[in-house]
Amino acid sequence: MSAYIPKNADEKLRSLLHWGKLRQEQLSEAFLITKDTVLGFLKRQIEHGNWRGVLEVLKGKPMTQAGRYMLGELRSKVVRKLIMRMGLRPVIATALVIVLLPIILAKVTGEVIGWIRNRR
């Protein structure tokens, strides 16, 4: 799922921690909040019958109209949760989402593919 993982993600994450003056515990909490939000969002979309949008986002093709809409909604939802639950400034929450969301989407995609393979 390399379509989502940015090059030099570790370096970007370290510079973000330094710039935002975040502690490692805050990063761990942000990661968990982001993952929970992504999983909940995708689950609700599937329950509403939006398989195509979920599939496009998980395949790393968010440039279709449905995929672009879902990815935008997902980003804004994660930013709002980080602001509300962690009290982060909007610019720091947005920067965290830009770095964390691709990593988490890649991880979720890997888990879904593994789950599907094991069900066969």
Image (spheres, helix red, strand yellow):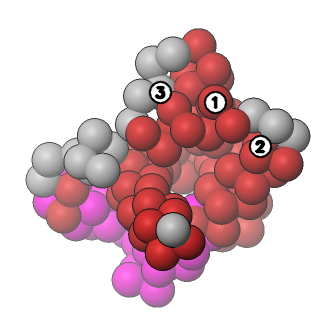
Q: Nearer the viewer, residue 73 or 89?
A: 73
Q: Main secondary structure of the magenta part?
A: helix
In the rendered image, residue 27 lying in the magenta stretch gets the answer yes
**Residue 113 tag number:** none
Instruction: Spot the residue most to the bottom.
Output: 25
Residue that numbered label 1 is attached to:
52
**Could you say whether the residue bearing mark 2 is in a helix, strand or loop?**
helix
Amino acid type, mark 3: Pro
Instruction: For marks 1 and 2, give the one nearer the viewer.
Output: 1
Q: Residue at position x 55%, y 38% from top?
A: 55
Dot 2, crowdedness within 10 Å: few (<14), some or many (≥20)? some
In the rendered image, residue 51 lying in the magenta stretch gets the answer no
Q: Is residue 103 above or below residue 80?
A: below
Dot 1, crowdedness within 10 Å: few (<14), some or many (≥20)? few
Q: Residue at position x 76%, y 46% from top?
A: 46
- Measured as percent of width and height from the top left, residue 98 is found at 41, 44
Residues at circles 2 and 3 in contact by the CB criterion of under 8 Å: no
**Residue 62 tag number:** 3
Q: Is residue 56 above or below residue 87?
A: above
Amino acid type, mark 1: Arg
Return the disc, 1 or 3, that comes first in the chain's sequence.
1
* Magenta span: 11-34
Residue that numbered label 2 is attached to:
45
